[in-house]
Image (tube, rainbow, N blue to C red):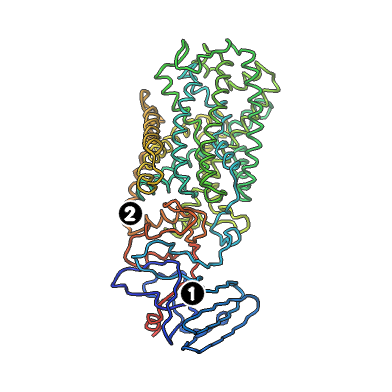
Amino acid sequence: MSGHIISKDAVRSNNGKRTTLNSGNNNKNNGNNNLNNININYNDSLKVPLLSSFINKNYNNNNNNNNNNNNNNNNNNNNNNNNNNNNNNNNNNNNNNNNNNNNNNNNNNNNNNNNNNNNKMVFKSEEDDESDIFSSNGDNNNNNNNNNNGKELKKNTLGLIHCIAFSIGGVGPTTGILFVFPQIAMVAGSSVPFTLMVATLCCLSMSSTISTFGRYISTSSSFYSYVSEGLGKEMGFLTGWLMIIGYLTLSVQTVIQFSSTTADVISRNSDFHCPWILAAIFVILFISGLAYVGINPALKLSLILVIGETLIILVFTLIVVIKGGDQGNYPLAFTPVGDYSGGVSGIARGLVYCVLVFIGFEVAATLGAETRNPKKNIPVAVVGSVVLTSAWMVWAMYAMVVACGVANLFIISSINSPAETFARKYVSYWFSILVDLAGISSTFNVCTSAFNNLFRILYSIGKTDCNPLVNKLAITSKRFQTPMAAIIAFSTFVTISLGIVASIWGIYTDNSWRIYGYLSYIGTIPLILIFIITNIAVIPYVKTKQPQDYQVFYHFILPLISALLFSAVLVGNFYPDVPQKPYSYLLIAFGGLVAFGIILMFILRSKKGLLEKMSYMIAHDGSTNSNSNSSNSNGGGNGAIDFNKHYNHDDITDYIPTTPSINAPRNNFIYDENFIDKSIK
């Protein structure tokens, strides 16, 4: 790569103060000694302990033209260097001096007609702290979609409908109706709809917190960046660690759920005893292949499937309610009272499962880097998905209460495949097959959202620029601009995990549903912890960094209530029923992983500036380009990013990323000519 030295006096000792990179204009011209255009070569892998590291003593090469112009009053020097295609016109006027330099090459097409050169980067003293350190005012980065270098996701490819489909697919409302309803009913009794309404309030308060952050921060790292900005880089790292544990666990769970559902449906309706591992292989290959092509077609497919399965369940629930089910309609189901209610303790325990039903509504937050107008669409999608799915599931689960009969709810576990059984009883055998297909469709959508969510989380980890091997996770497809390396890594992880499950517990569904239950339990706990931490983080974030928008109710009372509600849900996992084996072993393993994450955080913290660098690179999706879609913590997002607020070191070498994962343009540094003269000597 090459750099163009365009003007002098950009580097100064500044009385020993450190200097930072910043974009801006340099109008300084000194008499007869202007070093206007010197081309230098430097190596990406080098840090910058001495700027002389960058300098090549050969001022002329095959690609560049060097023009040294000495200007005196009333002297006009015209130097024209012409190549094939493009024109650079720089007209600099200094005290009756006119310099017209026309430089043509095959790479740039920039026209600057000013008293200064806008297409440059300058070293700026620490006292000036308002611009993006890696932005270039005249940089020829017109569109991120067209300048992908293998590290960027495709920008502006998703709209509001896609984001809503992604979140609704992550929730999987039909999955909750068909598979989670029995677990809620066994403890909450007839108050299942009421319990779900309480869970809706929890998730709405959480969606409000996500929406608040989403208005200022749009990135594929979601909670990691949210907590980093609110509670500091250390808590941000631990939140990211919990995200990895929770989402990886639940992703394996969703595959087992889909594959076991598919295998059971095939086995029930044919003579073939279908192994669940076959369906698992299919879903991994299909979703991964679709994700490689692009998330847009995956979300369109999810939207079609959601509409289809919802219509099937709607017909089923209407018929059940109209017919009166097993024991007639029961309006008290919408209250915490009644002879068949589980009471306060049952509702509290059922709330744990109801929160599990809603897990996935937050996944749209990871689409910030690919969504058009993310600061508007992401909050709407998160809140909208909770409202839509809760309204639908409250109705559908009331219909399931009616179908089962309130007196039978506490023994619903004795009914094999309740939804399919009720469909056959109240509609027809053929319609029960449609209900089964709706279940397969819903679990497939949950897998799609879980996979694509993990792809973007792993991609964000790859943008940390902390380790060459980890950085490879950020490699994207140059053709489709999708997270190719993350897709391969995650698909490999899931395949190995399922291989271990199959080798130990078998390839048939006799034991796979048991494993599904274990993973559901342990995978939900880290996400509940993340929700609590994020609710706390939004309070200091808005108070200190967005004080103009601070409102006591939305930015203090509501997040605090949400944190308390999720804390109660967390306690419900341990009390009054103390976890027994193997759940207790799973909790011990989870505690060990959290402890390891804390140790790792302290190790990274001991390395000066590493956590800050990781947070910055993840928050801005690894881009130091001012045209990046990612926003900064100041809420601007479309303007310059203040890197000085993320780095706080004395050595300029710490400011300059040194690995190829950085997508910053590095061909426009400005140096002081006197410094350069000394360096090259």
In the rendering, at what x and y percent does residue 363 appear?
Answer: 51, 41
Mark seen at residue 605? 2
Q: For this rendering, which residue is in front, 415 or 465?
A: 465
CA neighbours of label 1 inside 10 A, class few (<14), some (14 to 19), many (20+) = some
The image quarter in which residue 108 lies: bottom right
Q: For this rendering, which residue is in front, 236 or 491?
A: 236
Report the residue at 45% width, 29% height from top: 201
> Is residue 546 placed above or below 22 in the rendered structure?
above
Residue indicated by mark 1: 116
In the rendering, at what x and y percent does residue 484 appear?
Answer: 57, 53
**Quadrant of image for the C terminus:** bottom left
> Is residue 599 placed above or below 645 in the rendered structure?
above
2 or 1: tag closer to the N-terminus: 1
Q: CA distance from mark 2 to mark 1?
A: 42 Å
Report the residue at 42% width, 46% height from top: 226
The amino acid type of the residue labelled 1 equals Asn
Residue sticking out furthest to the right: 430
